[in-house]
Image: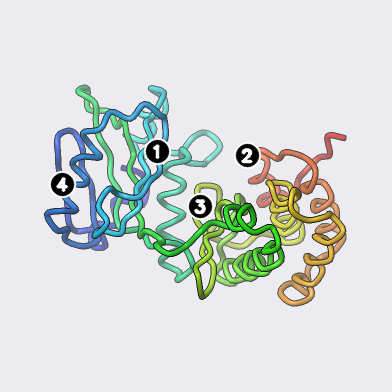
Amino acid sequence: MVGGTQNWQHEYPHTLRYRDTTLYLRSPIASHTRRAFERLIERNLPAKRVSAPLECDRSQLFTKREKLDSLKKKWRIQRGIPKRNGMYDWSIEELINTHEAARRGARVPALMGYGYSRSKLGLVQNVFVITDLLAGHVDGLTRVRQAPDAIHAVLRATFELLHALHCQGITHMDLWAGNVMLPEQGLAQAIDLENSFSGTTAYTGETLGFQFGFFYYREIYRYITEADYDAAVECALAEYFPDVQRTAFDRVYALAKHQDIGRLERREIFTRGVLESRW
């Protein structure tokens, strides 16, 4: 389907074909799981993208299904080629990034399968991504909405997770509270890796500045003062990133806390260290 996935057959050797859809799965599936996949495939989903647990409690799987909304996108995915900027479409980026992060042992849900459906003309029209269901977890935003005094615990768990991903060479450029999954006990996991990188950057200071600033900007500012957040970040830097280049970090951090930074701009930070103020 895309560059690289053709080499995954040994990892996902079990194929489910139903109607116009083909799914490649890591393990054999029980009949109840197959029926749940068939119901998902049959359903006419009005939304462009649907993310939800598979409707089978015994399966413990989470599914994402994206409806491709343009002929160009369908043609690119059909041919397995990236866009002009070298990126794949977002659903494919998530598939590749989740696979690589899990392969490295990063704390993300395991990729249990993937697939596609085709139109009558043979073009790919839906992409499926199937992961482990993180049962017994709640996302960080839900946690602080339910208990605002949990904000510092959520920050500590998130900053530890950011460092753990960093140690595995995974840079998550959409790590906000809703993408941090917290168990009742144990360590947090990250989800939604469509905008992430598996590799090193020459701009670690700028990238970390964005990650810490973005976490504050996206909802968390509602639950903590900026001064208290800055103090928590200082503690995290001292513990996890003591050698960060502070001039680069501080410049991007100050901007990322207060301005909306699009997904493509985030990639510019990682690849070129570039972020311009709009003030």
Amino acid at circle 2: Leu
At label 1, the amino acid type is Val
**CA neighbours of label 2 inside 10 A, class few (<14), some (14 to 19), many (20+):** few
**Disc 2 to disc 4: CB gap under 8 Å:** no
Residue visible at 25% across and 32% down? 43
Query: Residue at the spot x=69%, y=55% of the render?
Result: 211
Q: Earlier in the sequence, mark 3 or mark 4?
A: 4
Q: Earlier in the sequence, mark 2 or mark 1?
A: 1
- Give residue 264's mark: 2
Earlier in the chain: of badge 2 and badge 3, it is: 3
Whether residues under marks 4 and 1 lie with C-beta atoms below 8 angstroms apart, the answer is no
- Residue 102 x/y as whole percent: 42, 64
Crowding at mark 1 (Cα within 10 Å: few <14, some 14-19, many 20+): few
- Mark 2, mark 4: which one is toward the viewer? 4
User: Where's residue 165, x and y in %?
Assistant: 57, 66
16 or 63, which lies in front? 63
- Label 4 SS: helix
- Determine whether the residue tagged by mark 3 lies in a helix, strand or loop: loop
| C-alpha distance separating marks 2 and 4 | 38 Å
Q: Which residue is mark 4?
A: 35
Q: Looking at the image, is mark 4 or mark 1 earlier in the sequence?
A: 4
Residue at numbered disc 1: 50
Q: Which mark is residue 246?
A: none
Q: SS for tag 2? A: helix
Query: Which of the marked residues, 1 or 3, is nearer the chain's N terminus?
Result: 1
Residue 167, image x and y in percent? 59, 72
